Image (cartoon, helix red, strand yellow):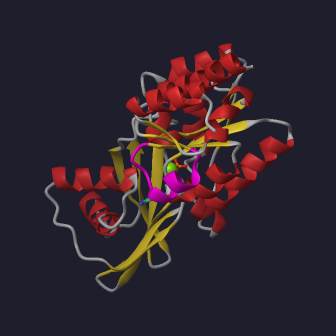
């Protein structure tokens, strides 16, 4: 039987775009010691704007570089892809066809364009594949950078910027008042992660993590005695959401994330996540 207070809370929460799929998850809210937040679209607005297009080969100009990148990105739903496609639209560039498209989860995309193999990837992918980041490479600490590879050669990079949500700092502050730590977990580069984490006054950040590593990071925190709530929106977050003591799928992200999580929030506003935790605490406090 579902205790009345829980039934009431569940109904109430539905009104707020909150779907509690697993009641134990909600019940456990009062035990949380750490909230692990994903970055893009949760702590940030999730709207990337292209700020730099930098070709690194003589025969390439900015338009050609982003034209090639857009060919791949038209097949991707990542916020980075949306940002690149918007820029191409603004520049009135016609997007070429891509064949054999493949997403490399958490690292980028690849396809064949005009007979050439093209990739658009993260700095982490470059490191792993021993491609050196060129001299003269510059990006602000707040910029997300993706690299374009043609064949096996580094052809250039595109920098994009996203904005921190105005509500995020307050959410982190409220958690702190409740003695709950906030940690940022992201596949994006360390500089961006450090900058967001510092701006928001978070306890720490874990950056450049590949999808399978997200799960390991949650386990690590749990083995240190933390009771972990985690937010995520993507397919690549699903295993970690399942591992967390409370998985919170946010936004209109992937169905897989929503299936694995104990709680689904229609909005990805960090303030709602905090309310949900406080709400869970208050509900069960009444029952003790
Ligand atoms: P997050 O943890 O912020 O959700 P993801 O795991 O989705 O990040 O992506 C990690 C990194 O992989 C991005 O910062 C980017 O460098 C790269 N990446 C992922 N998808 C794409 C894409 N469609 N185009 C270019 N780069 C991508
Ligand atoms: Mg994501």
Asked whether residue 52 is drawn in magenta, I would say: no
Q: Residue at x 50, y 77 (%)?
A: 152
Task: Write the start and end of the magenta stretch as one range.
Answer: 251-262
- The quadrant in which residue 247 appears is top right
- The quadrant in which residue 184 appears is top right
Q: How far across and how far down the image is residue 235, in percent?
A: 51, 59
Q: Is residue 184 visible?
A: no
Q: Nearer the viewer, residue 78 or 145?
A: 78
Residue 120 versus residue 262 in the image, above or below: below
- The quadrant in which residue 207 appears is top right
Q: Residue furthest front?
A: 1
Asked whether, in this view, residue 225 is left or right of residue 187, the answer is: right
Asked whether residue 261 is drawn in magenta, I would say: yes
Q: How far across and how far down the image is residue 115, in percent?
A: 33, 86
Q: Nearer the viewer, residue 25 or 146?
A: 25
Q: Quadrant of the C terminus?
A: top right
Q: Residue at x 26, y 64 (%)?
A: 67
Q: Quadrant of the N terminus?
A: top right
Q: How far across and how far down the image is residue 195, in percent?
A: 56, 31
Q: Is residue 25 visible?
A: yes
Q: Residue at x 58, y 63 (%)?
A: 125
Residue 257 versus residue 199 in the image, above or below: below
Q: How far across and how far down the image is residue 38, in percent?
A: 56, 42
Asked whether, in this view, residue 209 is left or right of residue 263, the answer is: right
Q: Residue furthest right?
A: 224
Q: Residue furthest left?
A: 92
Asked whether, in this view, residue 213 is left or right of residue 122, the answer is: right
Q: Nearer the viewer, residue 65 or 215?
A: 215
């Amino acid at each position: 039987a579902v205790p009345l207070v829980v039934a009431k809370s569940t109904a109430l929460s539905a009104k707020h775009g909150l779907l509690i799929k697993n009641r134990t998850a909600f019940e456990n809210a009062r035990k949380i010691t750490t909230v692990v937040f994903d970055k893009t679209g949760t702590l940030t607005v999730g709207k990337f704007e292209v700020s730099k297009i930098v070709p690194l080969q003589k025969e390439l100009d900015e338009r050609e570089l982003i034209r090639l990148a857009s060919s791949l990105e038209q097949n991707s739903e990542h916020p980075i892809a949306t940002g690149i496609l918007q820029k191409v639209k603004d520049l009135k560039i016609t997007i070429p066809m891509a064949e054999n498209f493949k997403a490399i989860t958490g690292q980028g995309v690849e396809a064949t364009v005009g007979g050439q193999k093209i990739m658009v990837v993260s700095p982490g992918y470059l490191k792993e594949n021993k491609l050196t980041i060129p001299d003269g490479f510059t990006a602000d600490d707040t910029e997300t950078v993706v690299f374009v590879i043609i064949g096996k050669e580094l052809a250039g990079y595109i920098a994009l910027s996203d904005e921190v949500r105005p509500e995020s700092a307050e959410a982190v502050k409220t958690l702190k008042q409740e003695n709950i730590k906030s940690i940022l977990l992201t596949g994006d580069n360390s500089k961006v992660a450090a900058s967001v984490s510092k701006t928001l006054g978070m306890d720490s950040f874990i950056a450049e993590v590949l999808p399978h590593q997200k799960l390991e990071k949650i386990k690590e925190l749990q083995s240190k005695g933390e009771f972990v709530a985690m937010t995520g929106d993507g397919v690549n977050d699903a295993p970690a959401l399942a591992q967390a003591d409370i998985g919170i799928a946010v936004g209109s992200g992937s169905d897989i994330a929503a299936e694995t999580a104990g709680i689904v929030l229609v909005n990805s506003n960090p303030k709602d996540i905090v309310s949900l935790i406080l709400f869970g605490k208050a509900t069960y406090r009444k029952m003790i």
